[in-house]
Image (cartoon, helix red, strand yellow):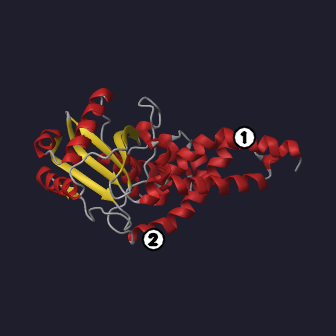
Amino acid sequence: MTAQQLSDGTDAFLTARPRLFAAAYRMLGTVSDAEDILQDAFLRWQAAPRAEVQDPTGYLMRITTRLCLDQLKSARVRRETYPGEWLPEPLLTEDATGQLDHDVSVALLLALETLSPLERAAFLLHDIFDSSYDDISAALNRSPAACRQLAARARRKVQRLRPQPPADPDRCRDLTEAFFRASRTGDTAALTQLLAQDVQLISDGGGKAMAALNPIYGRQKVLRLLEGVARKFGNTIPTRWRFCRLNGLPAVINLAEDGILQATSLEMADGRITRIYVTRNPDKTRHLAEALK
Protein backbone atom coordinates (compact mmCIF):
# COMPACT_ATOMS: atom_id res chain seq x y z
CA MET A 1 0.00 0.00 0.00
CA THR A 2 1.40 3.36 -1.01
CA ALA A 3 1.87 6.36 1.26
CA GLN A 4 -0.89 8.15 -0.66
CA GLN A 5 -3.29 5.25 -0.12
CA LEU A 6 -2.47 5.25 3.60
CA SER A 7 -3.11 9.00 3.76
CA ASP A 8 -6.40 8.72 1.86
CA GLY A 9 -7.48 5.88 4.14
CA THR A 10 -6.70 7.92 7.24
CA ASP A 11 -8.63 10.90 5.87
CA ALA A 12 -11.65 8.69 5.14
CA PHE A 13 -11.54 7.29 8.67
CA LEU A 14 -11.24 10.73 10.28
CA THR A 15 -14.19 11.95 8.23
CA ALA A 16 -16.33 9.03 9.41
CA ARG A 17 -15.02 9.05 12.98
CA PRO A 18 -17.72 11.23 14.64
CA ARG A 19 -20.44 9.00 13.18
CA LEU A 20 -18.57 5.84 14.20
CA PHE A 21 -18.06 7.10 17.75
CA ALA A 22 -21.72 8.06 18.05
CA ALA A 23 -22.74 4.55 16.99
CA ALA A 24 -20.24 2.78 19.24
CA TYR A 25 -21.12 4.89 22.29
CA ARG A 26 -24.84 4.21 21.87
CA MET A 27 -24.18 0.50 21.39
CA LEU A 28 -21.88 0.13 24.40
CA GLY A 29 -22.78 2.97 26.76
CA THR A 30 -19.18 3.84 27.64
CA VAL A 31 -16.78 6.38 26.20
CA SER A 32 -13.69 4.25 26.85
CA ASP A 33 -15.11 1.14 25.16
CA ALA A 34 -16.25 3.20 22.18
CA GLU A 35 -12.75 4.65 21.79
CA ASP A 36 -11.24 1.15 21.95
CA ILE A 37 -13.64 -0.05 19.26
CA LEU A 38 -12.65 2.83 16.99
CA GLN A 39 -8.96 2.02 17.38
CA ASP A 40 -9.65 -1.58 16.40
CA ALA A 41 -11.83 -0.46 13.49
CA PHE A 42 -9.05 1.81 12.22
CA LEU A 43 -6.53 -1.06 12.26
CA ARG A 44 -8.93 -3.26 10.32
CA TRP A 45 -9.63 -0.44 7.90
CA GLN A 46 -5.91 -0.03 7.24
CA ALA A 47 -5.70 -3.72 6.30
CA ALA A 48 -8.87 -3.71 4.16
CA PRO A 49 -8.83 -4.01 0.33
CA ARG A 50 -9.89 -0.38 -0.05
CA ALA A 51 -9.78 -0.40 -3.84
CA GLU A 52 -12.87 -2.58 -3.65
CA VAL A 53 -14.70 -0.30 -1.20
CA GLN A 54 -17.16 2.07 -2.85
CA ASP A 55 -18.61 3.56 0.38
CA PRO A 56 -15.87 4.00 3.04
CA THR A 57 -18.25 5.32 5.71
CA GLY A 58 -20.69 2.46 5.19
CA TYR A 59 -17.85 -0.06 5.26
CA LEU A 60 -16.44 1.44 8.45
CA MET A 61 -19.90 1.44 10.04
CA ARG A 62 -20.22 -2.28 9.31
CA ILE A 63 -16.82 -2.95 10.89
CA THR A 64 -17.72 -0.87 13.94
CA THR A 65 -21.12 -2.54 14.33
CA ARG A 66 -19.65 -6.03 14.23
CA LEU A 67 -16.94 -5.12 16.74
CA CYS A 68 -19.60 -3.67 19.05
CA LEU A 69 -21.71 -6.82 18.80
CA ASP A 70 -18.70 -8.89 19.85
CA GLN A 71 -18.02 -6.48 22.72
CA LEU A 72 -21.63 -6.63 23.90
CA LYS A 73 -21.35 -10.36 24.53
CA SER A 74 -18.71 -9.83 27.20
CA ALA A 75 -20.31 -6.59 28.41
CA ARG A 76 -23.55 -8.40 29.24
CA VAL A 77 -21.65 -10.91 31.34
CA ARG A 78 -19.87 -8.11 33.23
CA ARG A 79 -23.11 -6.24 33.90
CA GLU A 80 -24.78 -9.32 35.33
CA THR A 81 -22.21 -9.20 38.15
CA TYR A 82 -21.96 -5.39 38.34
CA PRO A 83 -22.22 -4.10 41.95
CA GLY A 84 -25.48 -2.17 42.29
CA GLU A 85 -27.09 -0.20 39.48
CA TRP A 86 -25.40 0.30 36.10
CA LEU A 87 -25.56 3.68 34.38
CA PRO A 88 -23.98 4.62 31.06
CA GLU A 89 -20.77 6.59 31.15
CA PRO A 90 -21.70 10.32 31.14
CA LEU A 91 -21.05 12.08 27.84
CA LEU A 92 -20.55 15.85 27.82
CA THR A 93 -23.01 17.46 25.36
CA GLU A 94 -22.68 21.16 25.99
CA ASP A 95 -24.64 22.35 22.95
CA ALA A 96 -28.28 22.30 24.10
CA THR A 97 -29.47 22.35 20.50
CA GLY A 98 -27.06 19.73 19.18
CA GLN A 99 -28.28 16.67 17.33
CA LEU A 100 -26.64 14.38 19.85
CA ASP A 101 -28.69 15.58 22.83
CA HIS A 102 -31.92 13.69 22.30
CA ASP A 103 -30.11 10.64 20.89
CA VAL A 104 -27.78 9.94 23.83
CA SER A 105 -30.10 10.52 26.77
CA VAL A 106 -29.58 8.25 29.75
CA ALA A 107 -33.15 7.01 29.38
CA LEU A 108 -32.49 5.97 25.79
CA LEU A 109 -29.25 4.21 26.70
CA LEU A 110 -30.97 2.39 29.56
CA ALA A 111 -33.80 1.45 27.21
CA LEU A 112 -31.24 0.06 24.78
CA GLU A 113 -29.97 -2.15 27.60
CA THR A 114 -33.30 -3.99 27.53
CA LEU A 115 -32.78 -4.98 23.88
CA SER A 116 -30.84 -7.86 22.45
CA PRO A 117 -27.58 -6.86 20.75
CA LEU A 118 -29.10 -7.43 17.30
CA GLU A 119 -32.21 -5.39 18.17
CA ARG A 120 -30.03 -2.60 19.46
CA ALA A 121 -27.88 -2.54 16.34
CA ALA A 122 -30.84 -2.65 13.94
CA PHE A 123 -32.69 0.11 15.78
CA LEU A 124 -29.69 2.43 16.00
CA LEU A 125 -28.56 1.92 12.44
CA HIS A 126 -32.03 2.50 11.02
CA ASP A 127 -33.72 4.98 13.37
CA ILE A 128 -30.70 7.04 14.44
CA PHE A 129 -28.28 6.76 11.53
CA ASP A 130 -30.77 6.35 8.67
CA SER A 131 -29.10 3.24 7.26
CA SER A 132 -31.09 1.24 4.74
CA TYR A 133 -32.22 -2.26 5.62
CA ASP A 134 -29.93 -3.56 2.87
CA ASP A 135 -26.94 -1.93 4.60
CA ILE A 136 -28.10 -3.21 8.00
CA SER A 137 -28.45 -6.67 6.49
CA ALA A 138 -24.81 -6.56 5.38
CA ALA A 139 -23.68 -5.43 8.85
CA LEU A 140 -25.70 -7.99 10.82
CA ASN A 141 -25.61 -10.92 8.39
CA ARG A 142 -29.39 -11.13 8.52
CA SER A 143 -31.94 -10.70 5.75
CA PRO A 144 -33.40 -7.21 5.20
CA ALA A 145 -36.81 -8.52 6.33
CA ALA A 146 -35.30 -9.88 9.56
CA CYS A 147 -33.55 -6.55 10.18
CA ARG A 148 -36.85 -4.72 9.67
CA GLN A 149 -38.49 -6.93 12.29
CA LEU A 150 -35.58 -6.41 14.71
CA ALA A 151 -35.82 -2.62 14.36
CA ALA A 152 -39.61 -2.58 14.72
CA ARG A 153 -39.50 -4.73 17.86
CA ALA A 154 -36.79 -2.54 19.37
CA ARG A 155 -38.66 0.64 18.46
CA ARG A 156 -41.77 -0.48 20.36
CA LYS A 157 -39.71 -1.19 23.48
CA VAL A 158 -37.77 2.06 23.31
CA GLN A 159 -40.82 4.26 22.76
CA ARG A 160 -42.31 3.00 26.02
CA LEU A 161 -39.23 3.96 28.01
CA ARG A 162 -37.93 7.11 26.35
CA PRO A 163 -39.09 10.40 27.95
CA GLN A 164 -39.80 13.66 26.19
CA PRO A 165 -36.93 16.19 26.44
CA PRO A 166 -37.46 19.28 28.64
CA ALA A 167 -38.58 22.35 26.71
CA ASP A 168 -36.95 25.33 28.48
CA PRO A 169 -33.13 25.15 28.84
CA ASP A 170 -32.96 28.23 31.12
CA ARG A 171 -35.61 26.85 33.46
CA CYS A 172 -33.82 23.50 33.49
CA ARG A 173 -30.59 25.17 34.54
CA ASP A 174 -32.32 27.06 37.35
CA LEU A 175 -33.93 23.87 38.66
CA THR A 176 -30.69 21.93 38.40
CA GLU A 177 -28.63 24.46 40.31
CA ALA A 178 -31.37 24.87 42.94
CA PHE A 179 -31.49 21.09 43.36
CA PHE A 180 -27.72 20.85 43.71
CA ARG A 181 -27.55 23.50 46.40
CA ALA A 182 -30.54 22.11 48.30
CA SER A 183 -29.33 18.52 48.14
CA ARG A 184 -25.83 19.44 49.35
CA THR A 185 -27.08 21.56 52.25
CA GLY A 186 -29.91 19.20 53.23
CA ASP A 187 -32.63 21.79 52.56
CA THR A 188 -35.59 19.40 52.58
CA ALA A 189 -38.16 22.21 52.31
CA ALA A 190 -36.64 23.35 49.01
CA LEU A 191 -36.20 19.78 47.79
CA THR A 192 -39.85 19.03 48.48
CA GLN A 193 -40.81 21.81 46.08
CA LEU A 194 -38.34 20.65 43.43
CA LEU A 195 -39.06 16.91 43.38
CA ALA A 196 -42.03 15.22 41.74
CA GLN A 197 -44.08 12.93 43.95
CA ASP A 198 -42.96 9.88 41.97
CA VAL A 199 -39.32 10.92 41.56
CA GLN A 200 -36.73 8.18 41.09
CA LEU A 201 -33.04 8.24 41.99
CA ILE A 202 -30.53 5.85 40.42
CA SER A 203 -26.89 5.93 41.48
CA ASP A 204 -23.88 4.05 40.16
CA GLY A 205 -20.80 3.56 42.30
CA GLY A 206 -19.56 0.43 40.58
CA GLY A 207 -18.46 -0.99 43.93
CA LYS A 208 -15.76 1.70 44.04
CA ALA A 209 -17.66 4.64 45.56
CA MET A 210 -20.56 5.13 47.94
CA ALA A 211 -23.89 4.74 46.12
CA ALA A 212 -27.33 3.26 46.68
CA LEU A 213 -27.34 -0.36 45.53
CA ASN A 214 -30.94 -0.18 44.32
CA PRO A 215 -33.09 2.57 42.76
CA ILE A 216 -34.90 4.84 45.22
CA TYR A 217 -38.56 5.49 44.41
CA GLY A 218 -40.81 8.26 45.73
CA ARG A 219 -40.25 11.75 47.09
CA GLN A 220 -40.06 10.84 50.77
CA LYS A 221 -37.49 8.08 50.29
CA VAL A 222 -35.37 10.25 48.02
CA LEU A 223 -35.56 13.10 50.56
CA ARG A 224 -34.36 10.81 53.35
CA LEU A 225 -31.45 9.62 51.22
CA LEU A 226 -30.40 13.12 50.19
CA GLU A 227 -30.71 14.40 53.74
CA GLY A 228 -28.47 11.60 55.00
CA VAL A 229 -25.84 12.19 52.32
CA ALA A 230 -25.81 15.92 53.02
CA ARG A 231 -25.37 15.27 56.74
CA LYS A 232 -22.51 12.85 56.06
CA PHE A 233 -20.64 15.52 54.12
CA GLY A 234 -21.33 18.36 56.54
CA ASN A 235 -24.26 20.04 54.77
CA THR A 236 -21.86 22.09 52.66
CA ILE A 237 -21.68 22.92 48.97
CA PRO A 238 -18.49 21.61 47.32
CA THR A 239 -16.05 24.31 46.26
CA ARG A 240 -15.51 22.76 42.83
CA TRP A 241 -18.65 22.26 40.77
CA ARG A 242 -20.24 23.48 37.56
CA PHE A 243 -23.44 23.21 35.60
CA CYS A 244 -23.20 21.37 32.26
CA ARG A 245 -25.18 19.09 29.99
CA LEU A 246 -24.53 15.37 30.10
CA ASN A 247 -26.22 13.14 27.52
CA GLY A 248 -28.41 16.09 26.63
CA LEU A 249 -29.69 16.46 30.20
CA PRO A 250 -29.11 19.37 32.59
CA ALA A 251 -26.44 18.23 35.01
CA VAL A 252 -23.82 19.16 37.59
CA ILE A 253 -20.34 17.73 37.90
CA ASN A 254 -18.52 18.28 41.17
CA LEU A 255 -15.62 17.09 43.22
CA ALA A 256 -17.23 15.56 46.29
CA GLU A 257 -15.81 15.78 49.78
CA ASP A 258 -14.62 12.17 49.60
CA GLY A 259 -12.51 13.00 46.53
CA ILE A 260 -14.89 11.37 44.04
CA LEU A 261 -15.72 13.20 40.82
CA GLN A 262 -19.52 12.98 40.72
CA ALA A 263 -21.93 13.54 37.83
CA THR A 264 -25.60 14.24 38.56
CA SER A 265 -28.08 14.45 35.66
CA LEU A 266 -31.78 15.28 35.91
CA GLU A 267 -34.93 14.55 33.98
CA MET A 268 -37.83 16.99 34.44
CA ALA A 269 -41.50 17.34 33.62
CA ASP A 270 -44.00 20.09 34.46
CA GLY A 271 -41.39 22.06 36.39
CA ARG A 272 -40.46 19.18 38.73
CA ILE A 273 -37.56 16.74 38.82
CA THR A 274 -38.76 13.26 37.88
CA ARG A 275 -35.53 11.28 37.72
CA ILE A 276 -32.05 11.74 39.17
CA TYR A 277 -29.01 9.92 37.80
CA VAL A 278 -25.90 9.99 39.99
CA THR A 279 -22.67 8.52 38.60
CA ARG A 280 -19.89 8.10 41.16
CA ASN A 281 -17.92 5.19 39.71
CA PRO A 282 -14.50 6.84 39.19
CA ASP A 283 -13.90 4.72 36.09
CA LYS A 284 -16.90 6.43 34.47
CA THR A 285 -16.26 10.03 35.52
CA ARG A 286 -12.49 10.29 35.15
CA HIS A 287 -12.78 11.72 31.64
CA LEU A 288 -14.87 14.64 32.99
CA ALA A 289 -12.06 15.99 35.14
CA GLU A 290 -10.87 18.39 32.45
CA ALA A 291 -14.36 19.93 32.22
CA LEU A 292 -14.26 20.79 35.93
CA LYS A 293 -11.06 22.84 35.72
Checking the image for residue 77, the label placed there is 2
Tell me if residue 44 comes above or below residue 12 in the rendering: below
Judging depth in this view, the residue of 132 and 81 nearest the camera is 81
Mark earlier in primary sequence (1, 2):
1
Q: Is mark 2 on a helix, strand or loop?
A: helix
Residue at 41% x, 31% y is 96
Residue at 48% x, 41% y is 128
Q: What is the total number of numbered labels drawn onto the structure image?
A: 2
Quadrant in the rendering for residue 192: top left
Q: What element carries label 1?
A: helix
Three-letter amino acid code of the residue under disc 1: Ala
* Distance between mark 1 and mark 2 Cα atoms: 34 Å
Question: x and y percent of residue 219 in the render?
Answer: 14, 50
> Does residue 122 appear anywhere in the picture?
no
Judging depth in this view, the residue of 288 and 241 nearest the camera is 241
Label 2 crowd (10 A; few <14 / some 14-19 / many >=20): few
Q: Name the residue under label 1.
A: 12
Residue at 73% x, 52% y is 45
Three-letter amino acid code of the residue under disc 2: Val
Question: x and y percent of residue 165 in the render?
Answer: 32, 35
Judging depth in this view, the residue of 263 and 128 nearest the camera is 263
Question: x and y percent of residue 222 in the render?
Answer: 17, 53
Quadrant in the rendering for residue 84: bottom left
> Does residue 35 appear anywhere in the picture?
yes
Judging depth in this view, the residue of 98 and 76 nearest the camera is 98
Tell me if residue 32 comes above or below residue 159 in the rendering: below
Question: x and y percent of residue 150 in the render?
Answer: 46, 53
Tell me if residue 36 comes above or below residue 191 in the rendering: below
Left or right of 279? Residue 45 is right
Quadrant in the rendering for residue 159: top left
